[in-house]
Amino acid sequence: MLEPSPDVYEAVKGLRVVRHFENRQLTDEHLDAILEAGRGTGSAKNRQSGAIVVVQDRGQLDRLAECGDFMTPLRNAPTTLVPVRLPDGYDWDLGRLSQNIMLAAASLGIGSCPVTFHREDDAKAVLGVPDDHGARFGITLGYPDPEAERTGRARRTLSGRKGLDSLVMRERFES
């Protein structure tokens, strides 16, 4: 049983993506800790119907970047994890796995950014993933480059978050 923790709540509430990383690889200790956090993620009926492909080779990362649009974070990252949905798996479980990976990374001072492979069949070919599996998303990981992040954020218009009154409906969806 978890004890109440304002620190955990603030970490969840404050998680933000990082798109610019230092030019150094994750330590094995950090990568293993992140993968362990992913492994511990719950899944529907405890099926554990997923796998994770770790991509760190620059040539392989570049090939993977061609499989989606808006891939600057992947091109900047030293590591990308690709959650793979096995044939009997659920996308919901991969979403839970991905969020846990991103939170675990943040707890270690490692930035992350989810990316979409808009050409999923190409991504599966690059990674050697069978046709009946899914590989639609990736999670870039790296030590944040604070200067590049600051400069990059200045160029983007941040809109903050919607208020709860715009997001939450009670009992029924109403547009």
Image (cartoon, grey):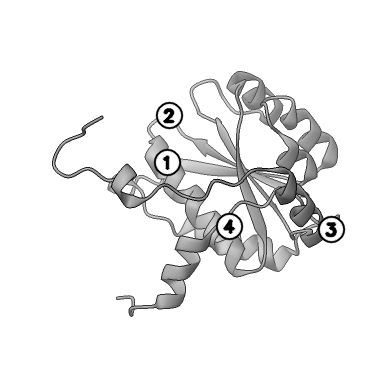
Q: CA distance from mark 3 to mark 2?
A: 35 Å
Give the number of the mark in front: 4 or 1: 4
Mark 1 is on which residue type? Ser
Which residue is denoted by mark 2 in the rendering? Answer: 87
Comes first in the chain, label 1 or label 3: 3
Which residue is denoted by mark 4 in the rendering? Answer: 35
Residue 156 sits above or below residue 14 on the image:
above
Comes first in the chain, label 3 or label 2: 3
Q: Position of residue 161 (x, y in %)?
A: 46, 49
Question: For mark 3, does the 10 Å Cα neighbourhood hold few (<14), some (14 to 19), or many (20 or more) residues?
Answer: few
Q: CA distance from mark 4 to mark 2?
A: 21 Å
Q: Nearer the viewer, residue 5 or 1?
A: 5
Q: Mark 1 and 2 residues: CB-CB less than 8 Å, in contact?
A: yes
Element class at badge 1: loop
Q: Quadrant of the C terminus?
A: top left
Question: For mark 2, does the 10 Å Cα neighbourhood hold few (<14), some (14 to 19), or many (20 or more) residues?
Answer: few
Question: For mark 4, does the 10 Å Cα neighbourhood hold few (<14), some (14 to 19), or many (20 or more) residues?
Answer: some
Comes first in the chain, label 3 or label 4: 3
Which residue is denoted by mark 1 in the rendering? Answer: 49
Q: Position of residue 11 (x, y in %)?
A: 50, 67
Q: Quadrant of the N terminus?
A: bottom left
* Tag shown at residue 24: 3
Q: Mark 4 and 2 residues: CB-CB less than 8 Å, in contact?
A: no
